[in-house]
Amino acid sequence: MNALFWILAAVAWCFALHGATRSSTVWAEADRSRGFWVTLLVVFNALLLIPYLVGVFPRIVGAERQAAQNPFSKRARR
Amino acid sequence: MTYAFATLRTQDDNDSSMFPAFSGPSDPYVFELQPDDGTHVTQFVATALKVHELRTKKTLLSLRDIKGQCFLTDARFVFCCEKYDKGGGWVGFGGLGAAVAITANAVSKARAAHRRKGKMLAGQVRYQWLAQVGGSTKMGMLDSEQLRLVVADGTRSDHPLLLVDLTLPKATDSAAVAQELVRRSSRFRLAHDVIEDGDRAEFERLTAAPRIASEKGKFGMHVVPRYWLAKASTSRLPVSA
């Protein structure tokens, strides 16, 4: 049980790291708060993994595709 | 009908002269495209909107933490926000407080969703209404990327200049958005409006306007030489005298 908890916690922290490294444009496009979700994932890790995977992660992935087409992105203009 | 850049629209509001109309189920965007809009529509996101009067500094509309969809078409700038009222905001401390806050937030968000049903906050600046446009680049921790459009409300007798400030995500280049907006606006005016010879050279220069870098906390503005007051009678070009 203890080992399972730490595995889920590690997965949650990986998702937190993934979320923290997405641009503000992606989070705005996904209509979710980066500070809120990354903080919750770091603090409550395994407990919030499923809500994050269901309600946030798919939006982030979709938003990333959308944001890649943004012609006004600073990254695209470099 | 007064013009304050954006207003609440329902499915029944079909007239898009002053504000955008809802699109049909087969349309690609949330607002209804018109023939003038062309096919080259560029889209980006804004996270806050503030509309205020230049002279009186009175705030007409202010929204934060939103997902506002912004579109540049060949004829206008369009802003649409479906989740303009989110509800929530309850905070609780301790076990009981947290439980109360979670419940209150759930109820508040459900009620907000019910209030929003079938409505969206929508606004537009037709290119003939655009007086100035500029961007303010994020340079410090407390700054944000901002886009400012200036338009004159023609529905009121004193024709106040309205400042439409949109906050963009920090990865979006507001100066590039302003540059594209003024270029499209100038091309549209040259193609559809009656331009006096004295202004033609300036409009032609603006079709290839450079990117104006802003100073910290200020906007780098493009100024359009001549513009129409925002009202229903000027929503179609050429405007009959």
Image (tube, coloured by chain):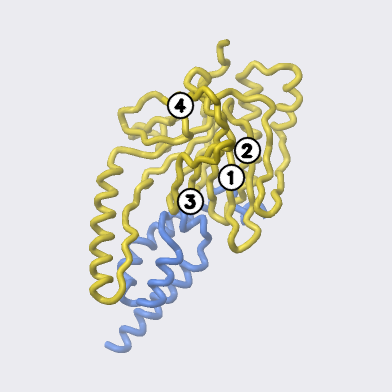
Chain colours: A blue, B yellow
Marks 4 and 1 close (CB-CB < 8 Å): no
Q: Residue A77 shows which numbered tag?
A: none
Q: Chain of mark 1?
A: B
Work out which quarter of the rendered image holds the N terminus of chain B and state it. Answer: top left
Q: Is residue B149 left or right of residue B224?
A: left
Between residues A47 and B91, which one lies in front from this camera angle? B91
Q: Chain of mark 4?
A: B
- Work out whether residue B118 can be spotted: yes
Q: Is residue B142 left or right of residue B26?
A: right
Q: Residue at x 44, y 72 (%)?
A: A16
Q: Which residue is mark 2?
A: B133
Label 1 vs label 2: CA separation?
A: 7 Å
User: Does B194 sit above or below residue B112?
Assistant: above
Q: Chain of mark 2?
A: B
Q: Amino acid at mark 3?
A: Thr
Label 1 vs label 3: CA separation?
A: 11 Å
Query: How many residues crowd mark 1 within 10 Å: few (<14), some (14–19), many (20+)?
Result: many
Label 2 vs label 3: CA separation?
A: 18 Å
Q: Residue at x 48, y 54 (%)?
A: A65
Q: Residue A8 location in percent, x, y?
A: 34, 79
Check chain identity for marks 1 and 3: say if they share one: yes
Q: Which residue is mark 3?
A: B47
Marks 1 and 2 close (CB-CB < 8 Å): yes
Q: Residue at x 59, y 42 (%)?
A: B148
